[in-house]
Image: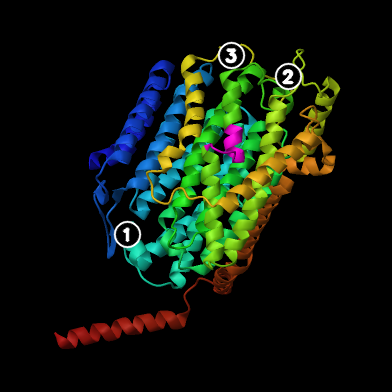
Amino acid sequence: MTWVVRLMVLVPALAGLLGLLARRQRVIASGIAVGAAATVTVLGLLQWIAPVRATDIDSLGGLPLLDLSVPLHLLSDRLSGLVSFVVALVVLAIQVFTVWYMRDDKRAGQFAATISLFAAGMLLVVQSSDLVLTLVGWEIMGWCSWLLIGHDSERYAARRAAYKAFVVTSVADIGMVVGLIALSVRARSTDLLDVLTVPGSDALLTVGLVGVLIGVAGKSGLFPFHDWLPDAMEGPTPASALIHAATMVAAGTYVIARLFSLYAVDDGARLLLAVLAAVTMVYAAGLALLQSDVKRLLAYSTLSQVAIMLGALAAAPAEVGPVPGVSHLIGHAFFKALLFLGVGWIAVLVGGTALARMRGRLRLRGALRWSMAIGLAALAGVPPLIGFFTKETVIDTALEGVAEGVGLGAWLVLVALLITVFLTAAYCTRVWLLLDGPFDPSGKAAALTPARLTGAVAEARALSDDEGVEVPEPHAGAEGHAPITLSAAFAVAGLAVLTVVGTLFLTTVEGALHLGWLTAVLSILLITGAAFEVWVLSRGGHEDVADRVPAAVRAGAERGLGADTAYARFGMAVTALARLVVVLDRDVVDAYPRATVVATRGLGRLGERSHRAIPSLAIVGLVVGVGMVVAVGVAAWL
């Protein structure tokens, strides 16, 4: 069965290449993408249920690198099989939905091919048993995210968001590269098993783990690298679903899960992970509550949920292991992909993703309405959906970490988790009340007047002028888009079903599910209290609870509390420092050798001018005398 593992990576990679070659034939390119995704899903199922488990599957053969072993092995175990299967399922749903969503896009074939290549990068990370292969898959996802976010390249906002994502994640990847090098040097090998079996804890291990954590923080959007992710919503909705659900932002959780035994023995790196996770989950959940655009709200939600996954890894006792964090990764993949595709469906109907435009549009929508309800309920952690079980597993893991004396990090994660449960339930309730609330048949929300809409757009433009962000026209939409196809609707409905029954998948992995009655009851009380408070403050959904927040605070939340401005100023500071270094190098460091050259040239010219260029009599006599002596000597010798 080792061939299954190799094909899991090879098939989507080849699909990406063939899709690019056939990109001008939209039907063929879409067929290649969907067919490859379906094939990989079957392969993922086979790997998950296969009895063969191996950690030394050959890929391309080892690399000769002096005394450093680089075997480039792949692995197959129950955890990698389940994660691969879930990733493949989500990618398949996204590819099917993309066929309908992007049907009027001239570059739809290229878009689908990029998704295939993106999936290959993620699956390589999941299947890798070698740090070099992990890094290759990691960077493939970074490049593909740049292409997907900036797909609508004629729009300034999309180009800016793509470059921002690429620059921020690439800067963080410097830490990832340094960290992987440190771990490899420590083990004298890039093989994962060799890296994990080196005993003890030392400075090189700390450098390696902190470096990897910095790379993960960049790709996963942990504070302070978080602000690129909300801006990534400028990409098409299927791209958002791919990046946020089961691929790039979740990949960091899987990487740290594979290195969990090392983090468990390094208190410094683990505490840093706990602090970043705790801050991010509360901070992002608070910002999500105040967003006026559904996609940006879901983006901040993703930041918070990924921090929950990583928080589980930071707080779990060594004997519990990393499985609770990966468990929430799997649950999040299902309900977050469902929510993004559902929002994309609504956006096509109403011509935008602003909550004001979507308000009341879920009524009488049948399958879409119930799918969105399931997704939001799972995100909030309502039982018996998968989000409830995975979130409670994380909370119980943190509580166990506190009891087992993991340290300050476990306390930080536990407190942050309880706050996040309340905030998550609050923003999920707010979204549901607005999407399913009172609706004016004229096409505008009951509480939104044309004057108010125009004023909001004007205010948004005034706020964004200094950052060069484009704000769409209030009535720009997607009129004329074809009605949703049965296959695309089935993709959304299928994700809804998986959100309900997906918990059964987790029963096949030991330690993926364990609940504590105390934490479960407390969590349900927090969810109920948050939902009730939002319902009361919104007067049963007739008002937006976010309108009760002062305008200045809400405007700041919409702009990410100035994180984008901080990024820009940091970039300007780095540029100014670089220019200073150039000046110092050119005008100070290089001044000494240049001064020597100038002085030597000046002395030469001075000597040249002081000399008449006419041979003196003494010199002529000396030359003649030397010649005569040589002639006499030669004659005498002969």
Sequence-wise first label, 2 or 3 = 2
The residue depicted at 30 percent of the width and 49 percent of the height is: 75
Q: Is residue 170 in sight in this rendering?
A: no
The residue depicted at 58 percent of the width and 45 percent of the height is: 305
Q: Residues within 10 Å of mark 2 (few under 14, many from 20)?
A: few
User: For the view shown, which residue lies furthest in the left direction?
Assistant: 638
Residue 506 position, x and y percent, is 42, 43
Residue 19: within the magenta? no
| Residue 281, label in figure | none
Residue type, mark 1 in image: Leu
Do callouts 1 and 2 mark residues in contact (Cβ within 8 Å)?
no
Residue type, mark 2 in image: His
Sequence-wise first label, 1 or 3 = 1
Tell me which corner region of the image, top left, top right, bottom left or bottom right, holds residue 589: bottom right
Q: Is residue 449 above or below residue 630?
A: above
Residue 268 shown left or right of residue 135 in the figure: right
Q: Residues within 10 Å of mark 1 (few under 14, many from 20)?
A: some
Return the residue at label 2. Answer: 475
In the image, the segment drawn in magenta is: 375-385
Residue 23 position, x and y percent, is 42, 22
For mark 1, give the secondary structure.
Answer: helix
| Residue 193, label in figure | 1
Q: Could you tell me how many numbered marks the image carries?
A: 3
Do callouts 2 and 3 mark residues in contact (Cβ within 8 Å)?
no
Residue 145 position, x and y percent, is 51, 38
